[in-house]
Image: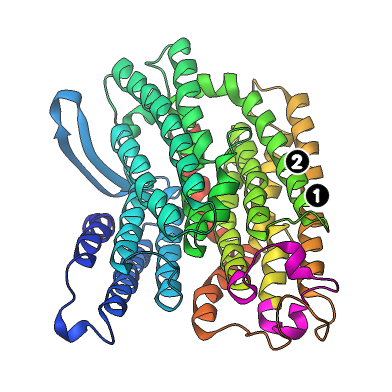
Amino acid sequence: MQFLLAFILAAPLIGAAAALLPAPPGLKGKSPEQAVLRHGVTVTAVILAAAIALTLGFGHDTPARFQATTDISWIQALNVRIHLGIDGISLPLLLMTALLFFLCALYSYYKLPQGPSPKAFVALLLVLEAGTLATFAVLDLLLFFLAFEMVLIPMYFLIARWGGAQRQAAAWKFILFTLLGSVVMLLGLLLIGLKSGTFDMVALASDNGRELTHTTQILAVLAIGIGLAVKTPMWPLHSWLPDAHTAAPTVGSVLLAGVLLKMGTYGFVRILLPITPGGMQTFAPYLGAFAAIGIVYGSLACLALARKGNKGDLKRLIAYSSVGHMGFVLLGIATMTPTGVNGALFANIAHGLITGLLFFLVGALKDRYGTADLDTLAGATGAALYGRAPRLGAFLAFAAVASLGLPGLAGFWGEMLALFGAFDPAEGLSRPAFLTYMAIGGLGTLLTAGYLLIVVRRVCMGDPKAKSAAPAALPDIQHYEFAAWTPLVALTVLAGLWPAVLLGLTDPAVQKLLAGGNS
């Protein structure tokens, strides 16, 4: 188990270095470009297989205990250790990350975005995977920061070099926002480490903030919370997200929504809740307020983009929907209850699966129509995907109803549990305030259903014989698209029908985390 986890974290970096080397003569295939893309698929497939093996070997009877642990002294003067391990909170995120990177590598093998060398594309993709996987597996505050920052440069170049229109401006906005947030976050992490005498997350969580004064906890939550909120992204620190999603290539958008946003919310759960509970209790009502505003704001922005005549970009609409969905995650965390935090973790996974699928589908629509502009797609009578490309239309309708939280699909449970958590928040928090947030969140679910059904009506319905932006014989789902999208559909259904698969892992770990390391 130790070897598997270390291998999962090291393999992407080794694969990235190998991707830059010349391909052996017998493995070139039709071209060196094809060889390096095949290399990317192979490396991510091996990492996914190792993650599945790690999941099968995980002690499901004791998900609250850290497993596959490695603890080696690294920088003795600062008491920084290479401390790795997974529990029921981090394992689902690790597995979903490995899956999404494999699906993106597979998709890119057949549909590589326009840009420079494929070697650089594959190498950046693998470095990005190394950083995201490490974020969910490290148990030292400084290692967490290094992993958290490791993803910024690869994502910047994926947007700036392989993106679409306005990619340079979007990439700069992404890097500046996240870097500024990270600088503030580093100060908070250093404050905790220096005041407590250790950067070990397990020891700090077990101590439950007893070694930190209330003032220190408040300062730490403020500093670390800003950095995490930018990556989440929380309203009003979200403005980099729509531009980055709109400009990014399809796989960049999938990974940004499916993986990178989860790093921020994971930091709230793994660091702030157990290590600075007093500071979190002080800021929880404000976090809940920002979350509730974000839910409604994201939905209203999507409604405006979906309205006829507004020239709304469908990728931008899905990006704004992420602001709303991640608002439910933050609301669940703000309740500081097992119900709310479990809902937040469930919503994290559901959002990664469903929004990843949505960005894949929007990318496919853009490839076929040459645009993601909703008015152009819909035309005068609707794009009529049901008639022109029925399987593509069915996938889009499925992803939309999953995203709006239809019972029986993954999107339902996380949002419902977050609202239940707000109904009865932790002791010491204002119940009237959280009941207000719950009511606002409930309104957000109605608005979410409204804009997603408008998108389905405008894009999927209509007269297939009418003139529109695409010919009547629109290419339906290709074999590689079907291979990349079907696992996300299957997992969305599985998590919706059998939520205990995920909650059985997260709940014991959450109970221990909120109890200060005591089961």
State left or right for residue 191 relative to residue 221. left
Q: Which residue is mark 1?
A: 447
Q: Amino acid at mark 1?
A: Leu
Q: Is residue 57 visible?
A: no
Marks 1,2: beta carbons within 8 A = yes
Circle 2 packing at 10 Å, graded few (<14), some (14-19), many (20+), is many
Secondary structure at numbered mark 2: helix
In-front residue for pair 156/190: 156
Q: Quadrant of residue 71?
A: top left
x, y (%) of residue 56? 37, 66
The residue range painted magenta reads: 366-392
Q: Quadrant of residue 352?
A: bottom right
Q: Which residue is mark 2?
A: 296
State left or right for residue 471 relative to residue 168. right
Is residue 325 a member of the stretch shown in magenta? no
Residue drawn at point x = 50 percent, y = 28 percent:
226
Circle 1 packing at 10 Å, graded few (<14), some (14-19), many (20+), is many
x, y (%) of residue 162? 43, 60
State left or right for residue 99 relative to residue 45. right
Residue drawn at point x = 21 percent, y = 83 percent:
27
Q: Quadrant of residue 114?
A: bottom left
In-front residue for pair 402/257: 257
Is residue 368 a member of the stretch shown in magenta? yes
Instruction: Identify the image quadrant of the C terminus.
Output: top left
Cα distance between the residues tagged 1 and 2: 8 Å
x, y (%) of residue 214? 48, 12
For residue 111, above or below residue 195: below
Instruction: Identify the image quadrant of the N terminus.
Output: bottom left
- Disc on res. 357: none
Secondary structure at numbered mark 1: helix
